[in-house]
Image (cartoon, rainbow, N blue to C red):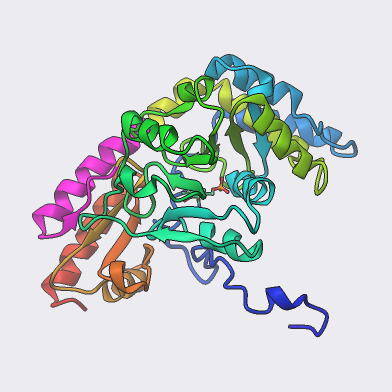
Amino acid sequence: MSRFLRKAFETLDVYVPGEQPRDKKYIKLNTNESPFPPSREVLDAVAAEAASLQLYSDPECTALRQTAAEQFGLQPENIFCGNGSDEVLNFAFMAFCDESKGMAFPAISYGFYPVFGDLYGLDCTAVPLCGNFTIDPADYFGLNKNIVIANPNAPTGLLLGIEQIRAILDNNRSNLVIIDEAYIDFGGKSCLPLIAEYDNLLVVQTFSKSRSLAGARLGFGFAQPEIIADLNRVKYSTNPYNINRETLAAGEAALRSQSYYDANCRTIMDNRDYTTEALRALGFEVLPSKANFIFARHSAIGGNELYLSLKEKGILVRHFSRPEISDFVRITIGTLAQMQTLVDAVRLILSQGGN
Ligand code: PMP
């Protein structure tokens, strides 16, 4: 830390991304990436765009927003493009929260929410989950804070229904409600249609999971035009060319390859069913996930121990040390072959008494 750092940042608890180890080749089931490559159309579009990299990218992301508008039945004015959905979330915290209006979010959820809260010095409320790790919408009534909820939630994978989200929106007409749909394409129902009805709703989606573009960094914010205009105020005050040319081309081509990505999502859901059943047969409690990961624990082995034993066998999963969930591991759903290897490794670890 240099002596120049601003005081408020000295105590920041920064976000710690999942490991991206370079020491050997792992079966990587720790950061919820897709096991499938981008579509052929995406690869071709990126290759073609490289020849224009001497030029700045389109700050308005015109073609991508137009294509997305057609696909989602919206207007381009309803759409904001971010450098990953992390940037959309960051801009939303920056634009809509201050000392008089903090943010509320589930106490167990995406680890970046409290980090943004800290970064902007906000008064945040971490709302406890229910005993079975679900979210009770009524816990979000009357807080007088903006709200961000991942749906499905991470790392639990549990999904709220549209009516539950509607209840949160109805009871927060003076607060912005952000629904982070990073994992919505794996069996959930998007609340995107609600943006026509609610001027307090911002829906955030990403290309990192269902659309195999984690490395390209692309996310969407969907809302009524006034909210989108506010996000643009922040963007044009920080980084107008926030999406590079290759990513813009990749995003547009990805939207045009919907059937390829739909098929991948169906495969991942099938592989999720297989893994859930196989782990339950081995005695695991597996929460009923609607995401491209599962959250599982076993009474005979701790979460950290299982994470370490799997790592030794060349399989990376994610473990969180917070006491409420330290029994669990979060396992990204990969190909069927990867999941079979995982299940075999887990079976072996259990038969060896947890080592
Ligand atoms: N929201 C949730 C709930 C996530 O798990 C992630 C992935 N880490 C993100 C947002 C951010 O994804 P990205 O920035 O890659 O779009």
Left or right side of 154 for 219: right
Q: Check the image and name the residue furthest to the right.
A: 54
Magenta stretch: residue 270 in it?
A: yes
27 versus 268 height, above or below: below
Task: Identify the residue at image location x=28%, y=50%.
Answer: 339
Q: Position of residue 227 (x, y in %)?
A: 65, 33
Task: Identify the residue at image location x=52%, y=57%.
Answer: 113
Residue 349 occupies which quadrant of the picture? Answer: bottom left
- Specify the quadrant that holds the N terminus: bottom right
Residue 50 occupies which quadrant of the picture? Answer: top right
Left or right side of 1 for 153: left
Q: Position of residue 343 (x, y in %)?
A: 22, 57
Between residue 339 and residue 173, name the one nearer to us: 173
Between residue 303 and residue 334, name the one nearer to us: 303
Residues drawn in magenta = 265-289
297 versus 294 height, above or below: below
